[in-house]
Image (cartoon, rainbow, N blue to C red):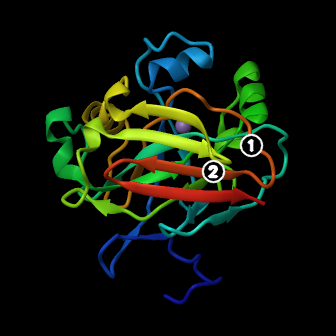
Amino acid sequence: MKLAIPAPAPVVIPVKGSDAAFPVRRIHCVGRNYVAHAQEMGFTGREPPFFFQKPADAIVYVPEGETGSLPYPVGTSDLHHEIELVVAIGKAGANIKAADAIDHIFGYAVGLDMTRRDLQGEAKKLGRPWEIGKAFDQSAPIGPIVTRQAAGDVENATITLDVNGKRRQESSIQKLIWNIGESIEHLSSFWRLEPGDLVFTGTPEGVAAVVRGDLLEGEVSGVGRLAVRIA
Ligand code: MN
């Protein structure tokens, strides 16, 4: 059937070392998944995992070695960075057991869960949804996807974020409260996962505000680097 309006462009992320791209279906995000970050947000870090989503078209792909440009979003005066390991799902499944999660993983990427912290804080206070703080346009800068086979030891990788050359966030994927397999187990018990889904696994401590002109450089060892400048 002919389309009544032009179809939206598919959202794709190139796969490193290949001429193929990974088509994005959904973006799931895990909240407060490092104890020290949960604590800096005023929580204990002892709660079950919880999730929120961003729209697929919030993706801003930045090739490795380049610096992407990220417009300072409207409606906020407290834009925060959250550097995260992103898991790319390659095989469908519901009620996936943590031990089997690896079979569902296509690869990994480095992503930023950009957050309008003032709007998120207001939503929390009023018991409203988080979309306005989390799911805004261009809120998910991401680098290329590295396949599971090509990635390093992701479970033990270091994760860092520098702003203007100064270290702001530094931790280890080992410190995830709910590791990759456990996060996929919980997530897939509430949503069926499909190829094309991305899972932002949470950010370590050190989140803070950025302003126009700031250069953000993130890295997950064995996965890659991501650089953006706030415009
Ligand atoms: Mn996050």
Name the residue rendered at 76%, 22% in the picture: 126
Q: Which residue is mark 2?
A: 216
Left or right for 164, reference 33 = right
Q: Earlier in the sequence, mark 2 or mark 1?
A: 1
Crowding near the residue tagged with mark 2, few <14, some 14–19, many ≥20 C-alpha atoms within 10 Å? many
Name the residue rendered at 42%, 65% in the picture: 144
| Amino acid type indicated by mark 2 | Leu
Looking at the rendering, in which quadrant would you find the C terminus? bottom right
User: Where does the image place residue 156, in percent across and percent down from the top left?
Assistant: 27, 36
Left or right for 226, reference 49 = right
**Quadrant in which residue 88 is drawn:** bottom left
Asked if labels 1 and 2 touch by Cβ distance under 8 angstroms, the answer is yes
User: Where does the image place residue 138, in percent across and percent down from the top left?
Assistant: 66, 58
Left or right for 215, reference 191 = right
- Numbered badge on residue 15: none
Label 1 residue SS? loop
Whole-number angstrom distance, CA of label 2 to CA of label 1: 9 Å
**Quadrant in which residue 6 is drawn:** bottom right
| Amino acid type indicated by mark 1 | Val
Name the residue rendered at 35%, 54% in the picture: 223
Q: Which residue is mark 1?
A: 210
Q: Quadrant of ligand 1?
A: top right
Name the residue rendered at 42%, 25% in the picture: 49
